[in-house]
Amino acid sequence: MKFGILVNEGPYTHQATDTAYQFAKAAIDKGHSVDRVFFYHDGVNNSSALTEPPQDDRNIVARWTKLAEEHGVDLVVCVAAALRRGIKDDNLAAGFRISGLGQLVESGIQSDRLVVFGD
Amino acid sequence: MDEDVSGTVKKFMFVNRKAPYGTIYALESLEVVLISAAFDQDVSLVFCDDGVYQLKKGQQTKAAGMKNFSPTFRALEGYDIEKLYVEKESLEARGLTEDDLLVDVTVMSSAEMADMMAEQDVVISF
């Protein structure tokens, strides 16, 4: 099955981002495809290259980057939501790209299922 | 994802569950709704829980220093977005009636709402 994923919350404060990642990974491991993960609302904070969690904790941003590198998942950050929260190309982590909301609607149209993770 | 999406019409339902001001969920959700209309999709909006306050008449946001985007709901018609559903139980729990709302809506029970959600292709909740 072709999945699209929407992440609406930021890292560490909300479980949504961890669950979204685990879901994406499990789906891919089972042979499904995750074509795009769209980051909206505080979800855009998942893409900050400035994120530096303590060594003994998971690095949520780096984890997404790895997912993109290994499985070609398209990580898209909403431009308007990103600018509101101080995310620009200057501090965008590898594997992410900034684009418009049309990419989310497109993902809804092209995927068999669009799965939303938020509060 | 470079396949052509033109011509594909899916049933998109946006479920609004949060109060309009104080957090940005409602405003940013409205932005997605407008974009989906530009993609010529079959769009409907649901308002439940505190989301019913998004349609409450007479919002005054000046003192709170927030942009008043409530008039945008009146403009939805111009984007051919005319399916607005409000959950009856949520209205009643908050002492509101249809007369308190700034646009024409269809009020339905949570059971009817569930049936309608089951018919959708894409359900996005905020």
Image: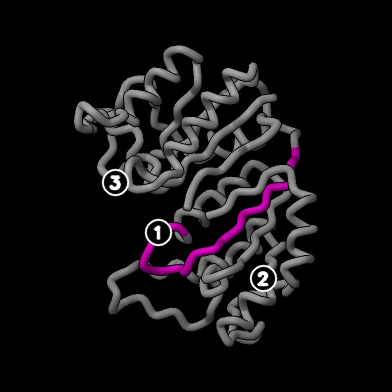
Are the residues under marks 1 and 2 on the same chain? yes
Q: Nearer the viewer, residue A38 or B60?
A: A38
Residue A102 placement, left or right of B122: left
Reply above or below: B26 against B52: above
Residue B74 position by quadrant: bottom right
First of labels 1, 2 by sequence position: 1
Q: Which residue is mark 2?
A: B86
**Magenta region, residue range:** B9-25
Residue at 75% x, 48% y: name it.
B120
Q: Position of residue B16 (x, y in %)?
A: 56, 61
Badge 2: how crowded within 10 Å, few (<14), some, or many (20+)?
many
Q: Quadrant of the N terminus of chain A?
A: top right
Circle 2 SS class: strand
Residue at 34% x, 40% y: name it.
A11
Q: Position of residue B9 (x, y in %)?
A: 75, 40
Badge 3: how crowded within 10 Å, few (<14), some, or many (20+)?
few
Confirm whether the magenta stretch covers residue B17. yes
Chain under label 3? A
Residue at 56% x, 82% y: name it.
B94
Q: Position of residue B81 (x, y in %)?
A: 67, 58
Reply above or below: A29 against B80: above
Q: Which residue is mark 1?
A: B24
Chain under label 2? B
Confirm whether the magenta stretch covers residue B68. no
Residue A93 placement, left or right of B101: left
Amino acid at circle 2:
Val
